[in-house]
Image: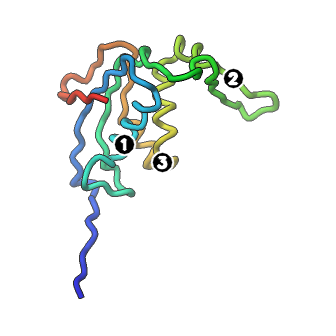
Amino acid sequence: MITTKTFMSKKENVRQGWYIIDANNLVLGRMAVKIATILMGKHKPEYTPHVDTGDFVIVINASKIRLTGKKMDKKVYYSHSGFMGGLKERPFEWMMKKYPEKVVRLAVSRMIPKNKLGRAMIKKMKVYNGAEHPHAAQLPEALTI
C-alpha cells in the first residue's frame, strides 16, 4: 500500500509578494473576488487553509470603481450601534463620496474568513483613493483583472 503525505505550508516558509491593482473602471464585486483570492493565498499551489499564505495587495484609484445594473441607486450599507433605533443606512453614492476606500475594504473583507486569520489577511490590503501610494520600495507587481 502506497501512502502519500499531504503538504502543509509552515508560517516561516511562506514568501509573500506584493501586487498592485488599478481599480479604474473595474466592477467592484469581480475585483473583490480576485483580491480576496490573493489575500488568502488560494492562487498559490502551496495554499494551506490554516496558514496565512497570501500576498500583499495595493489598490489604487478606489474612487473610480463601478457597479453593474441598478446597484448604484439601490445598494445600501447598514450598520447598527447596538442600541434601540441605532440602525444606520448609508447609500452607495454617499459612501463613494465620503469613504471610497471603505467600500473596497468592506467588499473584500466580506469574502475572507471571519476569524483571527481573516483579520490578519485583511491587514495586508492597502487601499488608496488616488493613483499615488507609498509602497514603491516593495516593488509591487502590476496585476490586471
Q: Earlier in the sequence, mark 2 or mark 3?
A: 2
Point out residue 95 in the picture as x, y percentages from the top left corner.
56, 17
Q: CA distance from mark 1 to mark 2?
A: 29 Å
Residue 11: give its label. none
Q: As drawn, is 78 to the left or to the right of 47?
A: right
Closest to the observer, 106 or 76: 76
Point out residue 130 in the picture as x, y percentages from the top left corner.
36, 13
Q: Circle 2 sits on which residue?
A: 89
> Can you tell which of label 1 and label 2 is closer to the viewer?
1
Residue 113: give its label. 3
Q: Circle 1 sits on which residue?
A: 37
Point out residue 84 in the picture as x, y percentages from the top left corner.
82, 31
Which quadrant of the structure image shows residue 16? Answer: top left
**Amino acid type, mark 2:** Glu
Q: Count neighbours of disc 2 (C-alpha within 10 A) and say few if under 14, some if 14 to 19, many if 20 or more.
A: few
Q: Count neighbours of disc 1 (C-alpha within 10 A) and say few if under 14, some if 14 to 19, many if 20 or more.
A: some
The reply to whether dot 2 and dot 3 touch (C-beta < 8 Å) is no
**Amino acid type, mark 1:** Thr
Q: Residue at x 43, y 19 (%)?
A: 65
In this view, 139 is above or below 45: above
Q: Residue at x 26, y 30 (%)?
A: 143
Report how many numbered discs are placed on residues in the image.
3
Q: Residue at x 24, y 51 (%)?
A: 14
